[in-house]
Image: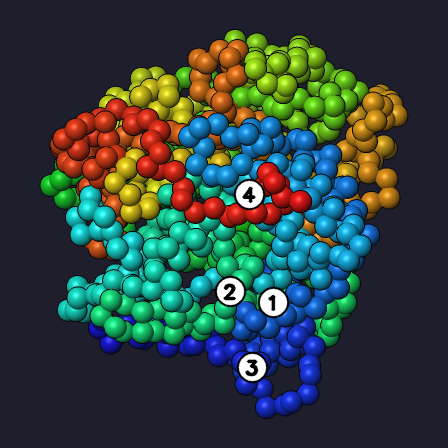
Amino acid sequence: MHPTTIAAVAVLSVCFGAPLDARHAETQEYEEPCKQVRNHVAKWMSENNIVPKDSTEFEQAIIPAAPAAPIPPSIAFECLKSVPLYKDTALGQLNFLRPLFEWQSTLDDLREPPEGYLSEGVDLLGGLDNITAKLQEAQGSYKNEFEFLADLYTLTSVRPRDLHFRYTSSLFDLFSFPRPARFVSISTDGISEPKIYLHADVNHAERRYTPSPVLTIDGIPALEFLQKESVKDGGCHDPDARFNRQFPSLANDAALVYTPSEPAALDLRDTTTVECQNGTKFEFSNFAFVRGNFSNITTGVDLYNDFGRGNGTGPRTSEAGNYVLLAKNYTSHFVGYPIPTNRTKNGNVAGFLPNKPEFSDVAVLVVNSFQGILGPDTFVTPPGVYFQEFFNVTTDFIRAAKAANRSKLILDVQGNSGGLVYNIATLYFALFPGSTLPQLSRARSHPQFAWLGAHLWNGTTSPAAGVWPLNNFIRPDHHPWTSFADLYGPHPDTGTPHEYTNPSIFNVTNYTQLFAAYQDPLNANGAQYTIPWTEPPFAPEDILIVSDGQCGSACAMTVSMLTHVHGVRTVALGGRPLLAPMQALGQTKGGPVINFAGMPEVDRGAVPEGLVLPPPADGFKPPLRVPGLEGVRGLGWGVTVSFNVVNMFPWGEEMEEGEVPLQMRYEAANCKLFFTWDMARDITAVWGAAAAAAWQGGQCVPGSTTNEEGTMGGIPGYTEKVADQYKLGDGPGVFGSD
């Protein structure tokens, strides 16, 4: 191990400042842990000359007034655990959540996952019962509020493996726990089993030393440690995608919206010890970053009053990611990338025509996000400007690629966790002009949905407004739904007791009208949404999708349409060191995400004009009104709750035989490649390896293709080799739990 690697530890102190270590405090007097947090933050801000800036409430919802201060994780956990359990309020939260869980499209599938679903199943409603029972035990299973929230967080934000289904409390958002010890998984040639190294060794070649693989992390074999950590990450249903989220990468650094994995949020130690095979040892200081305002906090009771009730100056759930997002230097080029031919201001789309012999006929379109409303001018730029820019950059680049005689296209979607339908339509129709986004969807049928549809739909207004935007969906035959009953059905799922709505497709016309209105709010006939060609610019066999498994939501929908309808091939990068296939789509493969917040906020005076809200019936409470609870905002525990509204299915399926939604299916890529040192520091090495596998007879990871000689072939089927050997284990929602 070269001595320069040691500098990685020192750099952290320079970048983040040195946090106080409560374990070596001179005073022997007991000090409340939350007061320690307050004092540490004040001292750190003073020593680093940080003064919180003045900002509006809206701006604070997007970006904090000051950087997050670092403290030892043990103090953060001690502070959280000093919050006493508020049993009645906790039970109120569970009662509040129970009817909302019915809207999660995969609720029934998660209870009994099909073969090929690589994560554990979870009974979400049963999990609420488990937690309720623990709260009601005479002796009390939970010692404090943190233990209760930890169970609820694991049930809702980890076990479903769905980024669209989330429940997060402000108390859990007060601290973030990124590990400063960063690693990479590197293969010598891209097809041999990789080993784990320190990320600081990426540039070892120019420093003229040979890196040593990591042997252990905190005394545990490195690979075992990282796989166990990855299981705690709820962002991906696929274990290879979860594994990739343990590592930094060029693509994730360039991504517009990237949420790093923080599986240590429940149990991060103050230090991480790393030992390499050559005997070198390193000790990294870990940090908890304080994201809330602790200036008035002394005790755990204070913390609950300010944040647990949801009325404090706490962070929003998206705040940390947006802080990084808005702090980016949007005028600089992506590190490790060549200069793009063109790109959007916020960097979510960039086109490249690499000037190397191996790319003489290859163009590369990097789409690291389908978002379009955040960027360097977020507070002054109308959303439609970003949509138009996505459209312009995409179409202009394809023109440039064809003019340069590039007959092949690599579509790089690494780190793309989704975005907006406007941008899906832009990219899909740019590649395959038309008027239909060919993917079927259907929602879970349940009494609340039926009640809302029967009483709150007047032909133009959607049930519960944003909960189900009916005008965004049409029949698969392209005709509008004539009534809510026409859409709702319900449609029985053969062989199960479950029911779903009739299949729908997205109403592209409605989205394009909204696109035009965004461009010119005063003129619905504003910017036109028309692809400037009528024939596909690239043949399906000349398009290759490159993914690290972290493609989800809008990204997954786009890739699914390209692969299922047109036969476009995929290459999956990285993953566990298995000589086996890997999925290209490892994140959410469901439909739109809807925030629960609007549902309890809609009161009986907010229904569409002319409609009468009847009383609740059939023994359930409609979600428009939860008696005795304030709702999500105000005094609603400072939470954010969201769900996945529809399951997605490939175009052309009849869905008469209990079809499995895409979220629960195993869908391997055509080829798998491990990262090499070159691929970790030069993105063109990634594209070159992928292009070689697709069009030049290059080798894939043995066992990852259907061709015996190891070249790219068809789509491999499910094999037990890809099953996840690591599990979360017992807990609320797991069969057999008390």
Secondary structure beneath dot 2 equals loop
Residue 411 seen in this snapshot: no
The residue drawn where x is 42% and y is 30% is: 116
Q: Residue 606 in the image: x percent, y percent?
A: 82, 32
Q: Marks 3 and 4, how far apart in space?
A: 34 Å
Q: What residue sits right under mark 4 in the picture? A: 159
Callout 2: few (<14), some (14-19), or many (20+) C-alpha neighbours within 10 Å? many
The answer to which image quadrant residue 145 occupies is bottom right
Q: Residue 218 in the image: x percent, y percent?
A: 40, 67
- Give the mark nearest the N terminus, 4 or 2: 4
Image: 103 above or below 318: above
- Judged left or right of residue 643, residue 660 is left
Secondary structure beneath dot 4 equals loop
Secondary structure beneath dot 3 equals helix
Q: What residue sits right under mark 2 in the picture? A: 268
Callout 1: few (<14), some (14-19), or many (20+) C-alpha neighbours within 10 Å? many
Q: Marks 1 and 2, how far apart in space?
A: 9 Å
- Give the mark nearest the N terminus, 3 or 2: 3
- Judged left or right of residue 132, residue 27 is left
Q: Are marks 1 and 2 in contact (CB under 8 Å)?
A: yes
Q: Identify the amino acid type marked 4.
A: Arg
Q: Marks 4 and 2, how far apart in space?
A: 19 Å
Q: What residue sits right under mark 3 in the picture? A: 23
